[in-house]
Image (cartoon, rainbow, N blue to C red):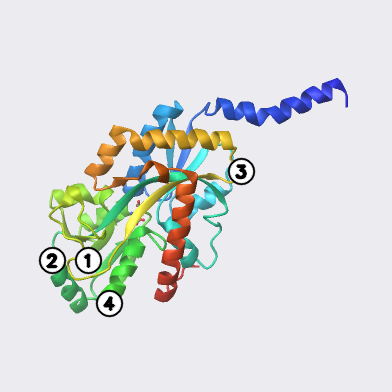
């Protein structure tokens, strides 16, 4: 091998290392599977603002919406593994494998896992003019009016879809579901009275519940939410064992270099401990995860545990999307 070739080979082999050391040198795109202004988008923009403080580069949110949140992970799968395209996704990563007959990605094996971010309970809401004012009356009302009721969600694979599935199964009543590209547009239609009910994360619903613009029938966690203390859990109001908590994780394309991943994990760790992020999340009824969950192993283990939890429930419900 000539000396020139040896130097060239050394430069090429050394390139990823130098690249990783300098990372990031330009803005990072953070893919969000749902519409701007909705709950996942709110978490995304909040954690991005905090991670930017460590990474010293802007994190720009791109809403890659549609197909119940499966478009954005599909896009991530074909993105360059260079740390400049990331994804924040929620519980849907663990339900999509059972819900979709042909899912273009495997959430466990097709990505690098950066870490978990925050856990968010959901709330069951009705439009402000819906007559019932508690869960017991709502269930009776839905059963009596099931042909007239519309139940909004963000598509098959969304948390709102999962919550709706659990709720309709718990009350043994099928309702007409209306899919949106996120729960931000679904909430707009609930406020406008075009749809009747919606199950959605507290990250979006808290201000509307507090201002009385919607009727709230309960939270989906097994314990009450501190910032919405007056709102009972669905479990305590007559649907024992009802439990859906939406968790979020950050993903990178498979093959992202370890030094880049390490920098992202460090920025995530700093982000979840940033008081600005933590306060905003707790005001919105959410729980920032413990440090050990904001790691690749923390996300991987939780993702696998959630796939194991939801797959039999979804199979039993017999719901599929193509
Ligand atoms: N809350 C939505 C869901 O149902 C997603 C969103 O718009 O953030 O999954």
Determine the CA span between mark 1 and mark 3. 43 Å
- Label ID, residue 173: 4
Asked if residue 269 lies left or right of residue 129, the reply is right
The kind of secondary structure element at disc 1 is loop
- Tell me the crowding category of disc 1: few under 14, some 14 to 19, or many 20 or more residues within 10 angstroms, Cα based: some
- Label ID, residue 2: none
Residue designated by label 2: 134
x and y, in percent, of residue 281 in the image: 28, 42
For the residue pair 17 and 81, the one nearer the viewer reads as 17
Residue for point 45% across, 59% down? 305
Q: Quadrant of the N terminus?
A: top right
For the residue pair 189 and 294, the one nearer the viewer reads as 294
Asked if residue 18 lies left or right of residue 85, the reply is right
Q: Earlier in the sequence, mark 2 or mark 1?
A: 2
User: Pointer 4 and pointer 2: residues touching (CB < 8 Å)?
Assistant: no
Residue designated by label 1: 235
Q: Quick one: which residue is furthest to the front in this view?
A: 292
- Label ID, residue 255: 3
Q: Earlier in the sequence, mark 3 or mark 4?
A: 4
Task: Name the mark nearer the viewer: 1 or 3.
Answer: 1
User: Pointer 1 and pointer 3: residues touching (CB < 8 Å)?
Assistant: no
Q: Earlier in the sequence, mark 4 or mark 1?
A: 4
Ligand 1 is in which quadrant of the figure? bottom left
């Amino acid at each position: 091998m000539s000396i020139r070739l040896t130097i060239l080979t050394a430069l090429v082999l050394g390139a990823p290392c130098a690249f990783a050391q300098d990372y990031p040198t330009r803005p990072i795109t953070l893919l969000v599977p749902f519409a701007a202004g909705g709950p996942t988008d709110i978490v995304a923009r909040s954690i991005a603002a905090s991670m930017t403080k460590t990474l010293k580069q802007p994190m720009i949110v791109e809403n890659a919406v549609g197909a119940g949140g499966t478009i954005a992970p599909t896009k991530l799968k074909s993105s360059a593994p260079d740390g400049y395209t990331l994804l924040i996704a929620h519980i849907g990563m663990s339900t999509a494998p059972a819900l979709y007959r042909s899912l273009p990605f495997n959430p466990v094996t097709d990505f690098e896992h950066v870490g978990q971010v925050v856990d968010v309970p959901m709330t069951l809401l009705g439009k402000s003019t819906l007559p019932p004012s508690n869960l017991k009356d709502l269930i009776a009302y839905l059963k009596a009016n099931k042909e007239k009721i519309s139940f909004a969600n963000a598509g098959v694979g969304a948390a709102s879809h999962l919550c709706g599935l659990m709720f309709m199964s718990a009350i043994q009543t099928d309702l007409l579901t209306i899919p949106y590209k996120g729960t931000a547009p679904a909430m707009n239609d609930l406020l406008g009275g075009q749809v009747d009910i919606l199950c959605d994360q507290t990250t979006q619903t808290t201000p509307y519940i507090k201002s009385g613009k919607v009727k709230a029938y309960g939270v989906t966690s097994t314990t009450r939410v501190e910032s919405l203390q007056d709102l009972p859990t669905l479990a305590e109001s007559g649907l024992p064992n009802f439990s859906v908590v939406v968790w979020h994780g950050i993903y990178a394309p498979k093959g992202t270099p370890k030094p880049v991943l390490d920098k992202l994990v460090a920025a995530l760790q700093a982000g979840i401990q940033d008081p600005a992020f933590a306060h905003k999340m707790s005001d919105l009824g959410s729980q920032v995860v413990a440090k050990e969950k904001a790691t690749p192993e923390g996300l991987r283990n939780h993702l696998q545990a959630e796939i194991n939890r939801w797959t039999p429930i979804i199979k039993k419900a017999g719901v599929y999307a193509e």
